[in-house]
Image: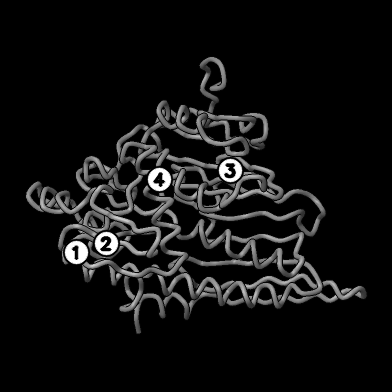
Amino acid sequence: MGKRQKMAAFLLILIVCLCAGCGEQQVKKSELILDTAVTLAAEGADAQAAIDESMARLKTIDSMVNPNVPDSDVNKLAQLAGTGKWVSLQPEVYKMLATAQDFAVKTNGAFDVTTKTLVDLWGIGTDHAKVPSPVELAAAQKLVGWQKLELNEEKQAARLQEKGMGVDLGGIAKGFAVDEVRKIYAKYGIENGLINLGGSSLYALGVNKEQTAWRIGIRHPRKEDAQEKMAVLPLKDAALSTSGDYERFFEAGGVRYHHIIDPRTGRPAQSGAISVTIVADSSVPDGGMLTDLLTTAVFVLGPEQGIHFLQTMPHGIKGAIVDGRYQLWTTGDMAKELEDVSKDFQFWQGSGELQ
C-alpha cells in the first residue's frame, strides 16, 4: 500500500446532510486529494451535487499535476526535457505555468516552478530529507531557472531546455483548484460554504451556520500544536492562503530546514519571514491561485521586499507577514481585521501603509 493510500485509509470521510423543509442542504465532505486533506462544505438545494462534482474535479486536476502519475503533464514535461520537443498541455496546466512565468518576471525569480530538482534533492517532508552536499546542490541548481521553461500560447504547449529539469506546481496548484471549485459552487447556486484544501489554501463563501463570517484561524508559527493560533481572521467571499516554515521541515545542527526553497540560492529561504498570509476578495480574478503563489513569493522575498511587492498588487489583495521577531507586517486593512491576536506578536511600527 502506497503512502497516499495509507493516509487515505486513516482519513475520515464525513458526509453530513441536513435537509430543511425548503429543500436546503448543509453538506460537508473530506477526502485526500492533491496530497492534502480536502474538506468541502456547502449549503443549498444542490449542495450534494456541487460537492460531488467538485471532488471529481479536484481529482482530475491532481492527475494533471501529480508527479507520481506517469501520464501527468508535469511528468511528460520532465520526460521530454532537453529534447527540444514541445509538450501539449491541458489548458489548466498551461494557465498555471503561464501565471507562474508572469510572477517569475515580476519577482525577479523569487517565484519559480522549475525548482523540482531542488525539491527532490532536499526531500523535505519525506522520509529521505537531508542537507545536500555543495556538489549535489550545485548540480541541481544548474537545472533550475524560469528562463529555461518555454511556453507556446498558440499551441498551449511547453518545453524545458535542459535534460533533468522538471516543474513543481506545489506553490500554485491548490490555489488554482480552489478557484475551480468556486466555479462549480457558483454553477449550483451555492452562496454559503467553505472550500478548504489542507488549511493552507481556502475560499470562504457567504456565512457559516451561525450566519456570521467564517472565522479562519491562522496558525502560530512556533507552537508544536497546530491548533495554537496566532490570530483569527473573519472571512467572507474571499480566498486565503498561508505558508510558513513550520509546515514541513527538519532540523540538523540546530538549523531549521523548511520546504520553501529560494530558487536563487537553491536552499530553504532565509528571508526573515516565518509565516505569510494573503487574502484576495471576490473582485480579484483567480484569487485562489494568486493568494497561493503569493504566499511563496512573498515568503522568499522577505518582510520588507514582500510588503512593498504586495502593495503593487491589484486592489482586493492584502497580506500579513510574520518575521522572526514576531512582528506582523501588514498591508491594506489586515491589521484592523485580525482578531484575537496572540500576545506573542506585535504589529510592525513603521510608517505609511506598513502601520
The secondary element bearing badge 1 is classed as loop
Q: Residues within 10 Å of mark 1 (few under 14, many from 20)?
A: few
Q: Earlier in the sequence, mark 2 or mark 3?
A: 2
Verify CB contact (< 8 Å) between mark 4 and mark 3.
Answer: no
Amino acid type assigned to the residue bearing label 2 in the image: Arg
Residue at label 3? 279
**What separation in Å lies between label 4 and label 3 (alpha carbons)?**
20 Å
Residue at label 4? 102
Q: Earlier in the sequence, mark 4 or mark 2?
A: 4
- The residue at the point 65 percent across, 68 percent down is 184
Residue 165 can be seen, yes or no: yes
Q: Position of residue 84 (x, y in %)?
A: 19, 64
Instruction: Name the quarter where the C terminus is drawn.
Output: top right
Verify CB contact (< 8 Å) between mark 2 and mark 3.
Answer: no
Verify CB contact (< 8 Å) between mark 1 and mark 4.
Answer: no
Q: State which quadrant residue 268 falls in.
A: top left
Q: Position of residue 254 (x, y in %)?
A: 24, 42
Q: Residues within 10 Å of mark 4 (few under 14, many from 20)?
A: some
Residue at label 1? 84
Foreground disc of the pair 2, 3: 2
